[in-house]
């Protein structure tokens, strides 16, 4: 063994974080940190552990909304700060399992398909879990998703359910009941049921806040069932709340095992030792690689088709949690870590070329799954003594080595298999790593002022559209003239784009192209 190889093995052995109780290891040996990092960051690490402990006790972790943050209680109800919350969590999980059993037994009708309507955290987590743990041809109910207010997207999904609506159960998920994208999707789907002569109320379940607009509609119309959406669970951490558990249970996924995996990971990641706590070690490596300033992007590379949607799920969890303009003292810091990814070995033929030889503005997170899949157990070989799974694993190790040789830093997470328990482990690992990292850089991971700003801006555009429609006349006028007429001077570009949209959808008449185009009211 060469000196270099011996050094690499020594570093790997010393830095490998093995967690046998949850079947997970985290390899940070290909990150270029010095051992002094743990001493340099000791005070910040201690503060992060303390902040997490306060959060789990029920401290107000989201001061913007004066809310507790309690997604960790979902997999251990005994941690919740009041007996009422403990009972609510436990009884809700029981209710979900009982409802799923009743649906599978045909007590509410015959359901073969599920249509889940939600957006953001109400869609990304459920979509990831459905794809990761689904068994095509063997799912109890086949899941479909409406996750946007795009009418074409809704129509495409409904087309997949053509002739099957009578056997489709619908879930509508919105905490407030007023989320525009979800409400719009619900109205479009409801119209499809009515066109088919079906009673929508007999097919639909609500997941929402108690007393919300959606809760009131579900109650007054007699929907199949209602499940609570607690205000102390944020959308991006709601996969192991009703948001994710209800559709998963209906699909036939073992939600108790998902919760067990997450709870077991929570136990491991409560240890106040940065070297043996994989969530803190993960957060610490993020901090080191990005200079604590988000200077590099996180590229998530799972070498497993079932984890294809993991990077999309992590985009919201990481970027909505960490992308903050202000720190806890109110200083402008503009923090965040950008996340993207696909899957191996597809990446070998896509952007790995740039990762290896191009701009070094990223760090990689490999997700390694030891058990290859059915073809391994069936004994299929693609070459003598070599399986398809061997190739996949070889591509992972080869890419890891190639990146290391090019001075590109990477982390490697290993789990034995993709099952309900280990999906729960992965969700919990990243949830806590995000919380730790936020503490290390002194920001609030549990609010989202930028998202709220975007929602307000969108509402303003719709208000402008109504003014523009009212300002259209029989005689053509350009966008500047219409903007002036409706009191929108300074917003001519938005007025022009609104007019183009109206004209393209048959609600106005456009003459000409570009900024000089004119618009008028549609006759009749």
Image (cartoon, grey):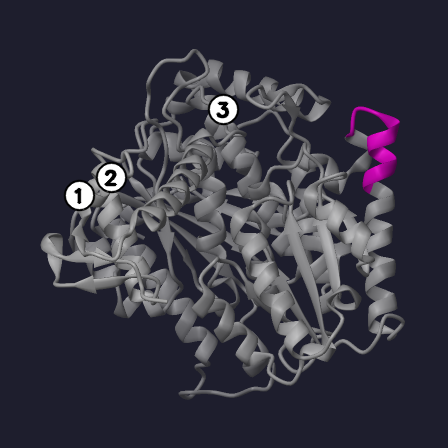
**Are the two marked residues, 3 and 1, in contact with CB atoms closer than 8 angstroms?**
no
Q: Is 36 rendered above or below residue 452?
A: above
- Picture mark count: 3
Q: Main secondary structure of the magenta part?
A: helix
Residue lying furthest left in this view? 516
**Are the two marked residues, 2 and 1, in contact with CB atoms closer than 8 angstroms?**
yes
- Residue 481's disc number: 1
Give SS at disc 3: loop
Give SS at disc 2: helix
Q: Is 128 rendered above or below residue 454?
A: below
Mark 3–mark 1 Cα distance, whole angstroms, equals 45 Å
Circle 3 or circle 1, nearest the eye: 1
Residue at the spot of label 3: 444
Q: Position of residue 126 (x, y in %)?
A: 60, 57
Mark 2–mark 1 Cα distance, whole angstroms, equals 6 Å
- Residue 16's disc number: none
Q: Is 443 rendered above or below residue 265?
A: above
Q: Position of residue 76 (x, y in %)?
A: 77, 38
For residue 474, say whether it is visible: yes
- Residue 485's disc number: 2
Magenta segment range?
80-89
Q: Quadrant of residue 366?
A: bottom left
């Amino acid at each position: 063994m060469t000196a270099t190889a011996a050094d690499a093995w020594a570093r790997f052995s010393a830095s490998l974080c093995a967690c046998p109780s949850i079947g997970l290891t985290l390899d940070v040996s290909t990150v270029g940190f010095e051992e002094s990092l743990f001493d340099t960051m000791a005070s910040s690490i201690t503060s992060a552990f303390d902040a997490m402990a306060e959060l789990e006790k029920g401290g107000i972790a989201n001061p913007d909304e004066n809310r507790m943050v309690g997604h960790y209680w979902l997999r251990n109800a005994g941690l919740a700060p009041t007996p009422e919350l403990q009972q609510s969590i436990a009884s809700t999980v029981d209710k979900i399992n009982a409802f799923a059993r009743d649906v599978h037994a045909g007590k509410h009708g015959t359901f073969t398909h599920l249509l889940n309507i939600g957006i953001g955290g109400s869609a990304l987590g459920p979509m990831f879990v459905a794809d990761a743990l689904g068994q095509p041809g063997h799912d109890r109910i086949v899941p479909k998703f409406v996750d946007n207010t795009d009418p074409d997207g809704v129509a495409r999904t409904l087309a997949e359910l053509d002739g099957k609506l009578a056997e489709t159960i619908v879930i509508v998920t919105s905490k407030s009941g007023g989320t525009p994208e979800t409400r719009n999707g619900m109205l479009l789907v409801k119209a499809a049921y009515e066109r088919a002569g079906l009673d929508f109320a007999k097919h639909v379940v609500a997941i929402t806040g108690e007393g919300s607009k959606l809760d009131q509609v579900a109650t007054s119309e007699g929907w199949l069932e209602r499940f609570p959406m607690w205000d102390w669970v944020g959308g991006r951490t709601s996969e192991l709340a009703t948001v994710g558990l209800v559709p998963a249970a209906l699909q036939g996924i073992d939600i108790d095992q998902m919760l067990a995996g997450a709870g077991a990971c929570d136990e491991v990641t409560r240890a106040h030792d940065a070297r043996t706590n994989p969530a803190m070690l993960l957060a610490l490596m993020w901090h080191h690689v990005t200079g604590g300033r988000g200077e590099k992007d996180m590229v998530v590379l799972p070498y497993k088709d079932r984890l294809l949607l993991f990077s999309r799920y992590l985009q919201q969890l990481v970027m909505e949690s960490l992308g903050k303009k202000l720190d806890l003292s109110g200083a402008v810091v503009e923090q965040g870590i950008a996340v993207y990814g696909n899957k191996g070995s597809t990446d070998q033929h896509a952007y790995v070329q740039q990762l290896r030889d191009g701009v070094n503005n990223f760090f990689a997170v490999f997700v390694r799954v030891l058990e290859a899949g059915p073809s391994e157990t069936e004994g299929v070989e693609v070459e003598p003594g070599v399986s398809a799974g061997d190739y996949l694993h070889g591509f992972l190790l080869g890419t890891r080595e190639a990146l290391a040789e090019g001075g590109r830093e990477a982390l490697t997470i290993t789990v034995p298999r993709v099952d309900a328990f280990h999906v729960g482990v992965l969700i919990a690992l990243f949830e806590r790593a995000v919380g730790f990292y936020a503490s290390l850089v002194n920001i609030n991971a549990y609010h989202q002022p930028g998202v709220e700003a975007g929602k307000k801006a969108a509402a303003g555009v719709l208000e402008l559209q109504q003014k523009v429609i009212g300002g259209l006349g029989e005689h053509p006028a350009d966008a500047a003239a219409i903007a002036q007429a409706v009191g929108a001077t300074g917003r001519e570009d938005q007025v022009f784009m609104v007019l183009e949209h109206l004209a393209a959808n048959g609600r106005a008449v456009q003459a000409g192209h570009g900024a000089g185009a004119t618009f008028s009211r549609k006759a009749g």
